[in-house]
Image (cartoon, rainbow, N blue to C red):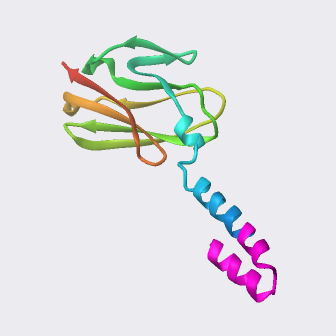
């Protein structure tokens, strides 16, 4: 980029010193802009992630890692603090390493709680996990649990 600016300066018959000054400034700017930017999404923090039987008043109820089929449903509860900007996260529910449900959830600043749920069926017994990911697919946390009789 700096080369093209210097070439343009010379075509416009500007002084070599002026062109070199512009070139040095642009080169310095280019080097600074190649540094890893601080992205707001990088500042997103998952403060709490848990599995539970219910969510009431934005709080998880009956947390656990083993759930009876008779409980009827399971919630994945997440609290993000801070949330620097409105963004999307996902709760990816896996049964025996097969993705069964992907829930897209919007979160907003400055702090946000959200949850997703699955309804349990007789065929759902066995090992499960929920992968909580950000909009780019980065795994923020994995919660493992089992469904039993």
Left or right of 116, for residue 65: left
Vertical relation: 52 (above or below) 5: above
Q: Quadrant of residue 92?
A: top left
Q: Residue at x 55, y 56 (%)?
A: 34
Q: Residue at x 44, y 18 (%)?
A: 54
Figure quadrant of the N terminus:
bottom right
* Residue 67 belongs to the span the image colors magenta: no
- The quadrant in which residue 113 appears is top right
Marks counted in the figure total 0
User: Is 11 inside the magenta-drawn segment?
Assistant: yes
Magenta-drawn stretch, dominant element (helix, strand or loop)? helix
From the viewer's side, name the closer residue of 92 and 82.
82
In the image, 80 versus 13, the foreground residue is: 13
From the top left corner, tell me how far across and down residue 39 is, in percent.
Answer: 58, 44
Q: Position of residue 135 (x, y in %)?
A: 49, 46
At horizontal 52% and vertical 29% (from top left) the residue drawn is: 45
**Looking at the picture, how far across and down is residue 99, in whole percent?**
29, 44
- The one nearer the camera, 12 or 35, is 12
Residue extending farthest to the top is 62
Which residue is more in the foreground, 93 or 110?
A: 110
Task: State the extent of the magenta-drawn residues as a range.
Answer: 1-21
Q: Is residue 147 left or right of residue 85?
A: left
Q: Residue at x 37, y 13 (%)?
A: 63
Q: Position of residue 104 (x, y in %)?
A: 48, 43
Q: Quadrant of the C terminus?
A: top left
Q: Is residue 6 above or below residue 31?
A: below
């Amino acid at each position: 980029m700096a080369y093209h600016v210097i070439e343009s300066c010379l075509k416009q018959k500007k002084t070599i010193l002026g062109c070199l000054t512009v070139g040095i400034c642009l080169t310095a700017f280019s080097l600074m802009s190649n540094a890893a930017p601080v992205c707001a999404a990088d500042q997103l923090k998952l403060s709490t992630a848990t599995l539970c039987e219910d969510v009431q008043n934005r709080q998880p109820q009956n947390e656990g890692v083993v759930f009876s089929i008779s409980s009827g449903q399971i919630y994945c509860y997440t609290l993000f603090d801070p949330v620097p900007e409105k963004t999307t996260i996902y709760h990816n529910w896996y049964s025996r390493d097969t993705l069964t449900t992907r829930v897209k959830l919007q979160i907003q600043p400055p702090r946000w709680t959200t949850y997703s749920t699955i309804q349990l069926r007789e065929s759902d017994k066995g090992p499960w996990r929920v992968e909580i990911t950000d909009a780019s697919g980065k795994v923020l946390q994995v919660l493992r649990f089992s469904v039993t009789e």
